[in-house]
Amino acid sequence: MFEIYYNCAVNDPFERKQDYETNPRRVALEIIIKQFPQHPQTLPLLRDKAENDTDEEVRKFAQQKLAELEK
């Protein structure tokens, strides 16, 4: 299952058109953090999304979760 969520977090082409829309990349990140916190690719994925995601909300979410996990 990790691979499915990882693929969505990395490759989903979602572009926000309305403020209320939920980005599938963010949903995939939430699931990965909750279900696979110890997976070796979780932190590298969060770091990448925190710096490089095209959606500002996903970047902010990843930055927040990364800060929480690295305490």
Image: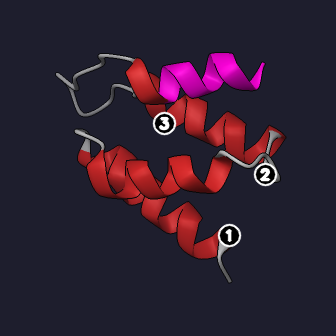
The relative height of residue 54 versus residue 48 in the rendered view (above or below) is above
Task: Name the amino acid type tagged 1.
Answer: Leu
Q: Which of label 1 and label 3 is nearer to you?
A: 1
**Predominant SS of the magenta segment:** helix
- Left or right, residue 23 beside residue 42: left
**Quadrant containing the N terminus in the rendered view:** top right
Q: Is residue 63 magenta?
A: no
Q: Which residue is mark 1?
A: 69
Question: x, y (%) of residue 52?
Answer: 28, 49
Q: Residue at x 69, y 38 (%)?
A: 32
Q: Is residue 3 magenta?
A: yes
Q: Nearer the viewer, residue 66 or 56?
A: 66
- Left or right, residue 36 beside residue 48: right
Question: x, y (%) of residue 18?
Answer: 20, 25
Q: Are marks 2 and 1 in contact (CB under 8 Å)?
A: yes
Which segment did they paint magenta? 1-9
Quick one: which residue is furthest to the front in this view?
Answer: 40
Task: Name the amino acid type tagged 3.
Answer: Arg
Q: Which residue is mark 2?
A: 37
Secondary element under disc 2, as helix, strand or loop, is: loop
Determine the image quadrant of residue 51. bottom left
Q: What's the distance in space between the residues labelled 1 and 3, CA to CA?
A: 16 Å
- Of callouts 1 and 3, which one flags the residue occurring earlier in the amino acid sequence? 3
Secondary element under disc 3, as helix, strand or loop, is: helix
Q: Which residue is mark 3?
A: 26
The relative height of residue 61 versus residue 24 in the rendered view (above or below) is below
Determine the image quadrant of residue 2. top right
Q: Residue at x 44, y 28 (%)?
A: 10
Q: What's the distance in space between the residues labelled 3 and 2, CA to CA?
A: 15 Å
Task: Name the amino acid type tagged 2.
Answer: Pro
